[in-house]
Structure formats: C-alpha cells, structure tokens
C-alpha cells in the first residue's frame, strides 16, 4: 500500500507551520491563487487541509472538493 502526501492550502499565516509536520505547503493568499494551486496539486497528494478562506474560494467557482483528494477544513 502506498501512502500519499498531505498538503495544506491557504493563507501563509495559516499553513506555513504545517511544513514542520511534513505537509506540502501551498501558500495562496488570494482566491485566484487558491484555484491555481488546487488545479496544480501533485498527483500523490491524498489529503488537502484547506483554510476556511481557501474553501470559500473553491466553492465560489464550483471547483470539486469532494472525492479524491480528500479534503478537511481547518477551524476558523
């Protein structure tokens, strides 16, 4: 069984510390940057931790966040 990686997507102040835990950190401080990072996710990422703002940015355009990779929203 292959274990995929975890990514954290959102504002710099919310995601950078997760690099210490081994997450792939995708800094996106604007809605467009969030959408660009989402579309460019590495194929071996199985879980994406989203900030609330990143979740909102993806929802505004109908980007699919269900299914694979699995997503989890950080608390506000």
Image (cartoon, rainbow, N blue to C red):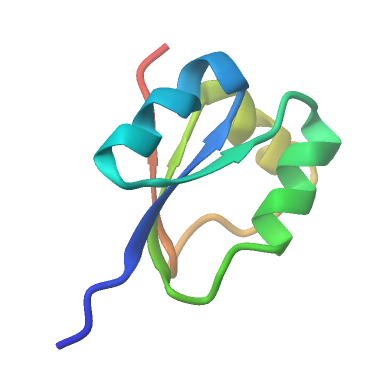
> Measured from the top left, where is residue 70 in percent x and y?
37, 59
- Left/right placement of residue 22 relative to residue 41 reads left
- Left/right placement of residue 46 relative to residue 66 reads left
Q: Quadrant of residue 68?
A: bottom left
**Numbered circles on residues, count:** 0
Which residue is pictured at 73% across the width and 24% down the height?
Answer: 29
Which quarter of the figure is the N terminus placed in? Answer: bottom left
Residue 22 higher or lower than 31, as above or below = below
Which residue is pictured at 76% across the width and 47% down the height?
Answer: 35
Check the image and name the residue furthest to the bottom: 1
Which residue is pictured at 80% across the width and 46% down the height?
Answer: 61
- Left/right placement of residue 38 relative to residue 32 reads left
Q: Quadrant of residue 75?
A: top left
Which residue is pictured at 79% across the width and 51% down the height?
Answer: 36
Is residue 62 in view from this perspective? no
Is residue 17 in view from this perspective? yes
């Amino acid at each position: 069984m292959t274990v995929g990686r975890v990514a954290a997507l959102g504002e710099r102040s919310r995601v950078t510390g997760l690099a210490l835990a081994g997450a792939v950190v995708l800094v996106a401080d604007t809605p467009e940057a969030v959408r660009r990072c989402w579309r460019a996710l590495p194929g071996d990422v199985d879980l994406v931790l989203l900030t609330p703002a990143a979740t909102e940015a993806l929802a505004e355009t109908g980007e699919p966040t269900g299914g694979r990779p699995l997503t989890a929203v950080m608390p506000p």
